Amino acid sequence: MKTQGGYTPKISGRPSNILKKIPLSSSLNIILNRNGRQYNSLVKEGQKVRIGEIIAETELSDSKEQATEKHQILVLPSPADGTVHLTVDEETDRTVSIKLLDIGFSVDKNPAAVKDPSRLTPVEARKILVKRGIWDYFWSSKTKGTPGINGETKPKAIIINTVIAEPFRTRGNVILQQFWHSIIKGMSYLPLLLADYGTVEFILTHKKDPIVKLMFKELTGKAWVKFHFVDVKYPVENPLIIDGLLRDTKVNLNPEDDIWVVDIQAVEAIGISLGKGVPISRRIVAMGGPAYPDPMHINVRIGTLLKDIIPSAVDLSSTLVLRGGLFLGTPVDPETDSVGFDDDAFFFLPVKKTREFISFVRPGIKKRSIFPTFMGKIDKDMSTQLRGELRPCIACGKCQEVCPVGLLPQIIHRYLYSDRIDEAQKMGLNSCIDCNLCTFVCTSKIELREEFARAREMLHAEREGVV
Ligand code: SF4
Ligand code: SF4
């Protein structure tokens, strides 16, 4: 498949293929927010829970399609045995996380939790995937998010993506090499979710990779599995891009056909949960960036506090930690934040502790330019702002060069800046896939992606009659 886009940042600290197992911490902290949804705790202070037990739930109702399906409940399973301590936000009086103390791991395998795909109906398969906290790993082209649970729509294709081009996120081949038996097992459940004559589409890179050859051999003869090879070009992992690539390749897909995307780590989770009876409890996470010594992948329990896994050589007072890699990462507080159900990367960036020298000649300077773009090359501490105002677009065209869907971000920005949202829409505002490349390379450090996402949210709210 011909891949669009492609951008390689010149930043050191790419995680190696080494996978290190992190020992179990004495306590875990399960944040009750997953994929932007707030979960409600189902457990009480002091309660003892077992691994795999459901500890929180929320309603799935992100879109019109999902709203038509009633009573769709997503859940969070406990990643370990432990005693519950609830953390409540004083302002909202809401439970924001469940701390597990006296941690244990009672079952390696639970034979009763093993489900053979040949003995499951499609409805049962969906219910089990939901109950085990796996459903949220799927993305649907219909809802542009988590698919509806009740089975009103079935996908014509499920894409398994192994290719992560973002250089600081968990690499597919690390998962493939370590867990390919579980992946093969996980794949055997996917036909239960498909529409009639649906297919599983495997996205890989490098036909010659030994592990890929092994998979070919294992899956030969399974007519429902198809293979595709793509170049490792960011943001090929974006579900919207993969969905588009598949539709370009397979002419028999109709625009209204639902396509689901799932990553290789999620397929492995299906394999161990349904195939081996082990509840989902860990993530493979890439730890990298210029401020991380010996960047690598780690195998870590969900809920582990970041401060428990960050090596002492990292000076947290001068390091910015981003959840989600370089391009889409958001800052986190290692003291209170922990590994979530969907995490696959933490990126460590040094922040210089320089004294503000002759600062009076640079009044209003606030935000440092930490990436190697125009200003970054001249002075790593150069600000994004001049005298407190935002820096204007200088029409350098760098954002346009990198946009993988061929938008002109600078023009959309100008329309939005002057409140001409209709014109911004005509220029493709709704086609933006949130890859953040334009923001990353922007010479003036304009938060383009954020600005576009805000505008789309506003339009969405208007359409839904919220404003
Ligand atoms: S406009 Fe959207 S799709 Fe294009 S580079 Fe920016 S964030 Fe990515
Ligand atoms: S990269 Fe930034 S400064 Fe350059 S054209 Fe795009 S928006 Fe303007």
Image (cartoon, rainbow, N blue to C red):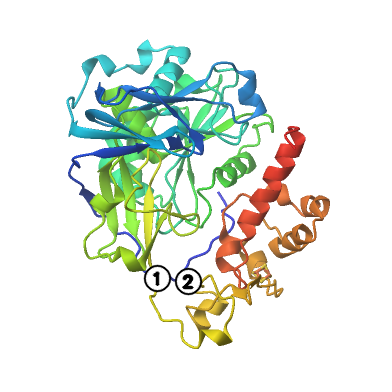
Residue 404 visible somewhere in the drawing: no
Tell me the quarter of the picture where residue 83 sits: top left
- Pointer 2 with pointer 1, Cβ within 8 A: yes
Task: Specify which label sits upstream in the sequence, 2 or 1.
Answer: 1
Dot label at residue 69? none
4 displayed left or right of 343: right
Q: Provide the residue designation for mark 2.
A: 370
Q: Amino acid at mark 1?
A: Val
Residue of label 1: 351
> Which x, y percent locates residue 404?
61, 57
Look at the numbered disc 2 and give the secondary structure of its residue.
Answer: loop
Residue at point 55%, 85% (across, down): 360
Q: Position of residue 338 (x, y in %)?
A: 33, 45
Per the image, label 1 sits on a secondary structure element best described as: loop
Residue at x 66%, y 49% (from the top left corner): 454
- In this rendering, the answer to whether 190 lies above or below 298 is above
